[in-house]
Image (spheres, rainbow, N blue to C red):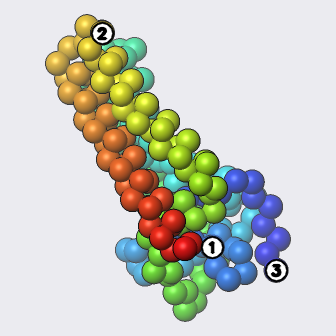
C-alpha cells in the first residue's frame, strides 16, 4: 500500500493513479512512468504541473506593472522553458521509475469529471461560462489597448471551449452511468 499523504487531486494530461492508488506521471517523450511517491515529491510535482499557468501569470504581471509587452512575453517564456528543463532533466530522473505501466484509455476530461458529483460539474460549467462572459464584458466596459482586448477575447474563447468540453464529458458520464 502506498504511504502517500497527498491532499487533493493532481490532474494533468499524463497524470494517472495506478491500481495501488499511487500517483503516476507518464513522460510521453521517453515513454517512461514515474511514481510521485512522497509529500516532498508531490509538492514539487504540483508546482511543475502548473508551470504553464505560472509562466503566463508572470508574463501578465510583468506586462501590467512594467507596461512592456515584449519583456513580459520573454520573461514568461523563459520561466516556462527553465522550469520544463529542470522538470525533465533533474526532477523526473530523481523519481522511481515504474516498469510496464499501462496508461488507461480514458480521456483526460472523463478522468476530470469521473469522481465529481453531478452538482459540482454543473456548478463548474456555470462558473466557467460566467468567467468567459465576464472577460468579454470587461473588454466592453474598459478602455484597453488593442492587444489586451485581443488577449481577453482569446482567453474568453479558450475558457468557453473548455466549458463545452466539460459539457461533453458530463453528457458522456451520464450515458455511461445509465
157 to 26, vertically: above or below = above
The residue where tag 2 is placed is 141
Q: Which residue is drawn at 80% across and 61% down?
A: 5
The residue where tag 3 is placed is 1
- Asked whether residue 100 is in view, the answer is yes
What number is the disc on residue 83?
none
- Between the C-alphas of marks 3 and 2, the distance is 55 Å
The residue where tag 1 is placed is 17
For label 1, count other residues whose C-alpha is less than 10 Å away and answer few (under 14), some (14-19) or many (20+).
some
- Between the C-alphas of marks 1 and 2, the distance is 45 Å
For label 2, count other residues whose C-alpha is less than 10 Å away and answer few (under 14), some (14-19) or many (20+).
few
Q: Which of marks 3 and 2 is in front?
A: 2
Would residue 109 appear left or right of 73 to someone viewing this image? Answer: right
| Horizontal and vertical percent position of residue 172 | 44, 67
105 to 124, vertically: above or below = below
Q: Are marks 3 and 2 in contact (CB under 8 Å)?
A: no
Would residue 36 appear left or right of 136 to someone viewing this image? Answer: right
Amino acid at each position: 500500500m502506498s504511504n502517500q499523504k497527498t491532499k487533493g487531486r493532481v490532474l494533468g494530461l499524463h497524470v494517472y493513479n495506478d491500481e495501488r492508488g499511487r500517483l503516476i506521471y507518464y513522460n510521453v517523450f521517453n515513454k517512461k512512468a514515474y511514481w510521485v511517491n512522497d509529500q516532498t515529491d508531490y509538492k514539487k510535482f504540483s508546482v511543475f504541473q502548473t508551470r504553464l499557468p505560472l509562466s503566463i501569470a508572470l508574463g501578465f504581471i510583468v506586462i501590467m506593472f512594467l507596461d512592456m509587452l515584449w519583456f513580459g512575453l520573454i520573461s514568461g517564456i523563459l520561466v516556462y522553458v527553465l522550469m520544463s528543463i529542470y522538470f525533465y532533466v533533474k526532477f523526473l530522473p530523481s523519481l522511481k521509475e515504474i516498469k510496464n505501466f499501462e496508461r488507461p484509455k480514458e480521456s483526460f476530461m472523463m478522468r476530470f469529471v469521473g469522481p465529481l458529483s453531478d452538482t459540482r460539474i454543473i456548478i463548474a460549467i456555470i462558473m466557467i461560462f460566467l468567467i468567459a462572459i465576464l472577460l468579454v464584458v470587461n473588454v466592453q466596459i474598459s478602455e484597453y489597448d488593442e492587444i489586451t482586448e485581443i488577449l481577453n477575447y482569446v482567453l474568453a474563447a479558450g475558457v468557453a471551449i473548455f466549458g463545452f468540453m466539460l459539457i461533453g464529458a458530463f453528457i458522456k458520464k451520464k450515458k455511461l452511468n445509465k
